[in-house]
Amino acid sequence: MKALQMPGTSKDDFLTLAQFMYPILPLPKVSWDNLEVLLVQGHKWDMQVVLGHAGEFLQANASSLDLSSNSSRYAFKWLQLADAAGLIDACKACVDRIVALDRSSCTVETLASLSRQTLMLHSAVLAEALNLAPSSKCAAATKEIQMPGTSKDDFLTLAQFMYPIVPLPKVSWDNLKVLLVEGHKWDMQVRGFVSASIKRI
């Protein structure tokens, strides 16, 4: 039997991942020591079970995150890794902790690497934090987001499905194309609304 090739993943990292892929007893534990491996390699190889364990740990331990860039619990590091792995709830936990510790730490520089999806999902909190931050570059952060090829009306159609608006917006034949095309174009995860609604319309 040929060896499984996993370029860029060390044997130690693979064995760390493997513990969380099989029902080993006692169950392995996520820790600050193995969290980065689980997030980075779990995302790289699309191991959703592994990412689930990592996300749960980060949410449960978000209160111990800090703002020291030399710390193993540096909040912006874990926010960026959770964002890259697509862990929405873990991202929220990190953002909430960062804002609670020091809103002014949210600057253009510290948020620059985040995905558009995360920035939009937490735009209200982050925009408020940016406006409070004593940074000379704050003005740049409040400029309009450029979305070439997307009209204002199409953007507003998408936006309805990105926030917990009540009453909930409805998918219809009139807005379905916009949601599918523009949602995919800007990586806005509105597919759950669309797929559930297509069955009814």
Image: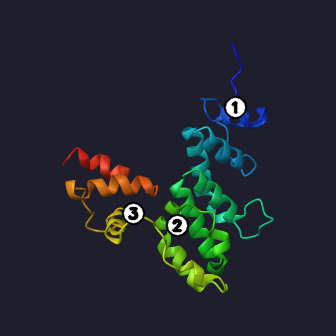
Q: Position of residue 114 (x, y in %)?
A: 59, 63
Query: How many residues crowd around disc 1 within 10 Å: few (fewer than 14), some, or many (20 or more)?
Result: few
| Identity, as a three-letter code, of the amino acid under mark 1 | Met
- Residue pointed to by mark 3: 162
Front one among 31 and 21: 21
Element at label 3 = loop
Residue 185: image tag: none
Task: Point out the tag, 1 or 3, that comes first from the N-terminus.
Answer: 1
Report the residue at 64% width, 55% height from top.
81
Element at label 2 = helix
Q: Distance from label 2 to label 1 (Cα)?
A: 32 Å
Q: Would you say residue 112 is visible in this rendering?
A: yes
Query: How many residues crowd around disc 3 within 10 Å: few (fewer than 14), some, or many (20 or more)?
Result: some
Report the residue at 44% width, 55% height from top.
185
Q: Position of residue 44 (x, y in %)?
A: 63, 42
Based on the displayed image, in which of its 4 quarters is residue 111 positioned? Answer: bottom right
Front one among 201 and 59: 201
Based on the displayed image, in which of its 4 quarters is residue 97 positioned? Answer: bottom right
On screen, residue 27 above or below 122: above
Q: Is residue 80 left or right of residue 117?
A: right
On screen, residue 107 above or below 195: below
Q: Position of residue 14 (x, y in %)?
A: 71, 34
- Residue pointed to by mark 2: 119
> Quick one: which residue is furthest to the top in this view?
1
Report the residue at 39% width, 56% height from top.
183
Q: Distance from label 1 to label 3 (Cα)?
A: 36 Å
- Residue pointed to by mark 1: 6
